[in-house]
Amino acid sequence: MTDLAAIRRICPPPSTGQTTPIDWNAVETELGMNLPEDYKQLADIYGPGEYCDYINIYHPHAATPWVNLTGPMPARIRGQLQHDSDQGTHPVPYPPQHLFAIGVTSNGEYLFWITDPQQTPDNWRIAVNEARGPLWYTYDGTLTEFLTAVMTGQTTVPQFPRDLLDPPISFKPSTAPPTDYPQNPPRPAVDTETIREWARANGYAVPPHGRIPLDIKDAWEQANRP
């Protein structure tokens, strides 16, 4: 069984016809680099959305620029990593120019391709940083291999919550329709500590660490819509 087939078995994708075709030539031209084939197949099948109510893989058709593969976040995050490396704020285990952000978790960890060597994207490995700390985790395999290993419990990422695999394991498609990159993008993602503070002030029981329950995130979004 291939890794993509394993992901589809563990975490069923949306029904056929619910995803929008992707012009990969245009995406790769805009990024100035070729992309791993396993990622392109995953994005074609699943579309934009969230795995296990926690892992959001960047997608060319994401509803907001903050989780869009061709949006501002990969370059912005790389710039922050370069600043951290230059200032010694947090150790960065790889040259920042070889790290391309490919996803984000509900807790604020980022997933990266280690794009070295850049000419062989199908061999790129995966790195995960700590949301508010120095810890890094490296997975010696592709994105789909990483997701398979995580969702089957074969790999435990120290930064991820212990209840990540509580059933059901599912994929939640983005509810907003794909849009072009807006001239005035919506406000960026809010730090999870802000949501925790709001939840406590409004009588919700929220864990101090790890995944914020989906009903609390939904309530916060409803209460803080512009």
Image (tube, rainbow, N blue to C red):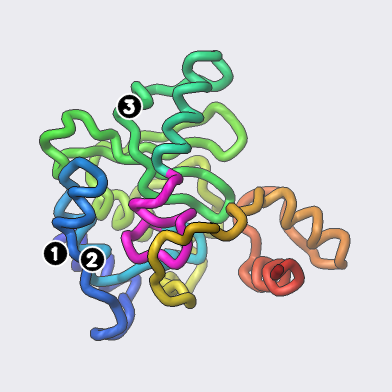
For marks 3 and 1, the one nearer the N-term is 1
The percent position of residue 169, horizontal first and vertical second, equals 43, 70
Query: On the rendered image, what quadrant is the C terminus found in?
Result: bottom right
At a point 32% along the width and 60% down the height, the residue shown is 60
The residue nearer to you, when weighing 189 against 142, is 189
Separation of residues labelled 3 and 1 (CA atoms) = 34 Å
Taking the image as shown, residue 119 lies to the left or right of residue 61, namely left
Say what secondary structure mark 2 lies in: helix
- Give percent across and percent down for residue 88: 54, 14
Residue drawn at 34 percent across, 65 percent down: 61
**Residue 136 image position (x, y, % from top left):** 45, 31
Q: Which labelled disc corresponds to residue 97?
A: 3
Distance Cα–Cα, label 2 vs label 1? 6 Å
Q: Which residues are magenta?
A: 57-73
Outermost residue on the top side: it is 87
Q: Are marks 2 and 1 in contact (CB under 8 Å)?
A: yes
Residue at the image point whose x is 14% and y is 61% from the top? 2
Mark 1, residue position: 1
| Residue under pointer 2 | 6
Residue 178, above or below 73:
below
